[in-house]
Amino acid sequence: MNIVEIIQKKRDGRPLSAAELRYTVDGYLSGAVADYQASAFCMAVWFNGMNDDELSAFTEAMRLSGDTLDLSPLGITVDKHSTGGVADTVSLIALPIAAACGCRIAKMSGRGLGFTGGTLDKLESIPGFRTRLSEKEFFGTVEKYGFSIIGQTGELAPADKKFYALRDVTATVDSIPLIASSIMSKKLACGADALVLDVKTGNGAFMKTPEAAHKLAGALTRIGRLAGKRTAALVTDMNQPLGTAVGNAVEVAEAVSVLRSAAPGRLTELSLRIAAEMVFRSQKAASIEEAQKAAAAALESGRACRTLAAVITAQGGDAGIIDDLSRLPHPAHRLTVCAGEAGFLTAVETEEIGRTAMMLGAGRLRKEDGIDPAAGLVLSKKIGDRIEKGEPIAELMSAREAVLPEAAARLKKALTVGEAPVSAPPLIYQTEES
């Protein structure tokens, strides 16, 4: 087999075999395929795409390039993944709800990078919480309480890391087949039987339009189907932050508040829908409607909140935060931001909100950067809300007092205030199923 012939074949729009794709992946990982050859391969895929058989084979080759997790001792398991957004605290709400409905979720999660947050960083803002567990502890927590979230162990899909770094510098990041295979190679390596995927779209998401997000959701579910996994992908809105809190401890506080009170809102609504999809895909309900009723009951009864408390304790954290949010990290400095004019909030530059939180210390530019667990911001308005001049619209929190005025100015520029009210964008655009 010859990499030049493989590149030429894909360049000419002809489909590649599973053996050719495995040769390309293994060769690039071992060094037998050079960077410039892998770059040419990625560009050929960017121009000509992949059919379903190619997409499945390429994803499988990357899945098998590293460690894989065997979850079969846990019975039927389900996993959840978001493509990333701002104030997206769904995992901390949906997983306890689904677990309280009988699901088993052994989740490996990541850290925040850029303007989107990471579930591990949020959990580690809980005093004492451990995201590194032995396999025995990890499986034991899932068996006893229904879910556990830890950092990645071993080396999952190392070929994907190499391809992603290459795509980042060769203008091939935005290829739907390459994005979908990147996501699914890691998810499939984690071993769950069912997958629920939250594909974000809007100005605070990687996929800027619903049409692009729909294409990605379709590719993801087709990979899942061909891998024998029960898969659902929801296309959801990120034209404004999902919740009100952006940061780490502040997002934990918001998640706990939702679990305690079941207060309505976009974050609650999406968390319930994701949880219901997990319940249905885990075969814990006969229909999505039955699963939605079960999820709502788990939230409203307090069972989901108690489940989160039990998992926090099991992973070494202070479950006292459930009843006393003041036990979470406190910021050294706060600044209330007030509206400069009256009107209605008509638009939000969501990515800028995320970058404002980064400026305050809640995010990182590089994986090795540290973060301030108490840093972040809380917004008090959503699109369509009335705003009065001088009214508080946000609170900023940071260990560095000097950055607060600049962050406040940046946040104000990210909010558009108009004279006429507007409707909020839809929360869920559509659902793809396998």
Image (cartoon, helix red, strand yellow):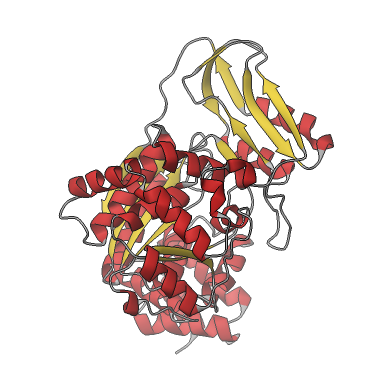
Q: Residue at x 63, y 46 (%)?
A: 327
Instruction: Give the farthest residue toward the right.
Output: 402
Q: Does residue 200 appear anywhere in the picture? A: yes
Please state the horizontal and vertical placement of residue 176, each as a whole percent of the image: 43, 57
Above/below status of 404 relative to 315: above
Above/below status of 56 relative to 145: below
Instruction: Give the farthest residue toward the left.
Output: 286
Please state the horizontal and vertical placement of residue 209, each as a whole percent of the image: 44, 40
Instruction: Give the farthest residue toward the bottom.
Output: 1
Please state the horizontal and vertical placement of residue 47, each as a whole percent of the image: 45, 60
> What quarter of the picture does the N terminus occupy?
bottom left
Q: Is residue 177 left or right of residue 28?
A: left
Q: Give the image quarter of residue 187.
A: bottom left
Q: Is residue 324 left or right of residue 95?
A: right
Above/below status of 123 relative to 340: below
Q: Residue at x 31, y 59 (%)?
A: 221
> What quarter of the picture does the C terminus occupy?
bottom left
Please state the horizontal and vertical placement of residue 257, each as a whole percent of the image: 48, 39
Q: Is residue 1 left or right of residue 273?
A: right
Q: Give the image quarter of residue 302.
A: top left
Above/below status of 46 relative to 22: above
Of 428 and 174, nearer the camera is 428
Q: Is residue 90 left or right of residue 118?
A: left
